[in-house]
Image: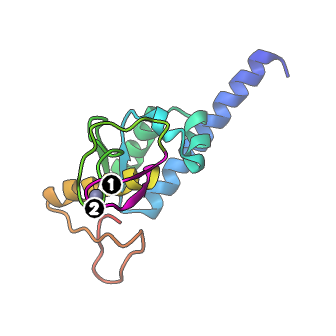
Amino acid sequence: MDPIKARIHRKVEGKLKSITLSRQLIDENQAVIVETLKVKNMLKNRKLSKHIADASWSGLIQKLEYKAKEQGKHLVKIDQWFASSKTCSFCGHKLEALSLKVRDWQCPACLIRHNRDLNAALNIRAQGILTLKAAGLSVSANGGKRQSGHEPVAA
Ligand SMILES: [Zn+2]
């Protein structure tokens, strides 16, 4: 395959993967919470990095937005200024700074140990749930499993 064709092929493949991922996320959840513009951090998450490298993060968010609207579901966008990485998800203590190289850290206030990505994800989820609740939606943080009868909007 010549280089131009190969590049187009890669682009199309990346788009298709992004469409599949966004569809899967919206199909399986009543609400999806994403952080905007922190591509540099997100690329360090091994599970997501391949998808993000294939399709731009903002492109993925656009697709999520479209699919969420289509299905009457919720997409909560947490902006880049929310200190998801350097805020302790356990006690709320906020560090002055946290270098990108630091993957694990200990909260000086409550002494709990954090994995950087997991801690950030917990903060983003909590912030997203607050946003959904503020919008008057019933939210149950149960890890994605829907309860029978009463249906929460986010997990
Ligand atoms: Zn803490």
Q: Is mark 2 within 8 Å of ligand 1?
A: yes
The residue lying at 39 percent from left, 75 percent from top is: 146
Q: Is residue 109 magenta?
A: yes
Q: Which residue is mark 1?
A: 107
Residue at 63% in and 35% down: 14
Residue at image coords 37%, 38%: 98
State whether residue 74 appears in this view. Answer: no
State the SS at label 2.
Answer: loop
Callout 2 amino acid:
Cys
- Ligand 1 occupies quarter: bottom left
Residue in front for this viewpoint, 148 or 45: 45
Residue reaching furthest bottom? 149
**Horizontal and vertical percent for residue 55?**
56, 34
- Report the disc number at residue 117: none
Circle number at residue 110: 2
Establish if 56 lies above or below 25. above
The image quadrant of residue 112 is: bottom left
Q: CA distance from mark 1 to mark 2?
A: 6 Å
| Quarter where residue 139 is shown | bottom left
Q: Is residue 112 left or right of residue 1?
A: left
Amino acid type indicated by mark 1: Cys
Mark 1 C-beta to ligand 1 under 8 Å? yes
The C terminus: image quadrant: bottom left
Q: Quick check: is 117 in the magenta stretch?
A: no
Q: Is residue 48 above or below residue 152?
A: above
**Chain part drawn in magenta:** 103-116
10 Å neighbourhood of mark 1: few (<14), some, or many (≥20)?
some
The residue located at (29%, 42%) in the rendering is 83
